[in-house]
Amino acid sequence: MSTFEPVEILLVEDSDTDAEVALRALRRAHLGNQVVWVKDGAEALDYLFRTGEYADRPNGEPRLVLLDIKMPKIDGLETLRQIRERDPQHRIPVVMLTSSAEESDLLRSYQLGVNSYVVKPVDFIQLSEQIVRLGFYWLAMNRVPSS
């Protein structure tokens, strides 16, 4: 990916296996040409806020953030809180893509302004299919206001 291309998807996932399934599924569906994968919430915030190793990245926001909850450094709920604090208009769609089916995580995610909450299936084929559906919906079907 050229550094001048806009990023379509920011994938925030600490599991190498789940990330690889997501990346392959998105590429097969021609939705993954412009994906940045980061492994924790701290790196996601650096990317979004252009700090740390991403301080010099070009302007532009991802069209979608796929965010896991259970991660090292900064978890997905705190990452979401900070994203919404800096983006109160909710211009960046955030989808929790997590193995957590806990009602408290679901409730807290919506309280913090998540756009959607999806529990990852354990089966890799089902996970792959679900990621393709998410990507297609948020990148091809969903309409957002112009900035």
Image (cartoon, rainbow, N blue to C red):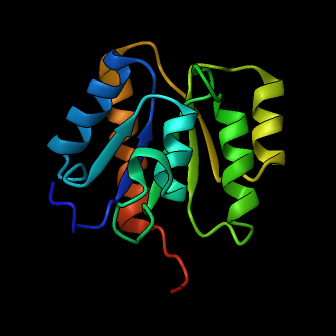
Residue 85 versus residue 97: which sits nearer the camera?
A: 85
Q: Position of residue 132 (x, y in %)?
A: 32, 43
When the figure is inspected, residue 76 is found, relative to residue 4, above or below; the finding is: above
Q: Is residue 110 left or right of residue 65?
A: right
Inspect this view and state whether residue 114 appears. no
| Residue 9 visible within the image | yes
Q: Residue at x 78, y 46 (%)?
A: 110
- Where residue 137 sits: x, y (%)? 42, 57
Residue 16, image quadrant = top left
Please give left or right for residue 75 compared with residue 107 in the image: left
Task: Tell me the residue at 15%/54% (across/down).
Answer: 1
At 63% from the left and 47% from the top, the residue drawn is: 116
Q: Is residue 106 left or right of residue 76?
A: right
Residue 8, given in percent of the width and then of the height, sits at 34, 59
Query: Vertical placement of 136 versus 24: above or below?
Result: below
Is 12 located above or below residue 15 in the figure? below
What is the residue that sits farthest to the top in this orientation?
Answer: 122
- Measured along the vertical axis of the image, is residue 78 above or below residue 122? below
Furthest toward the bottom, the residue is 146
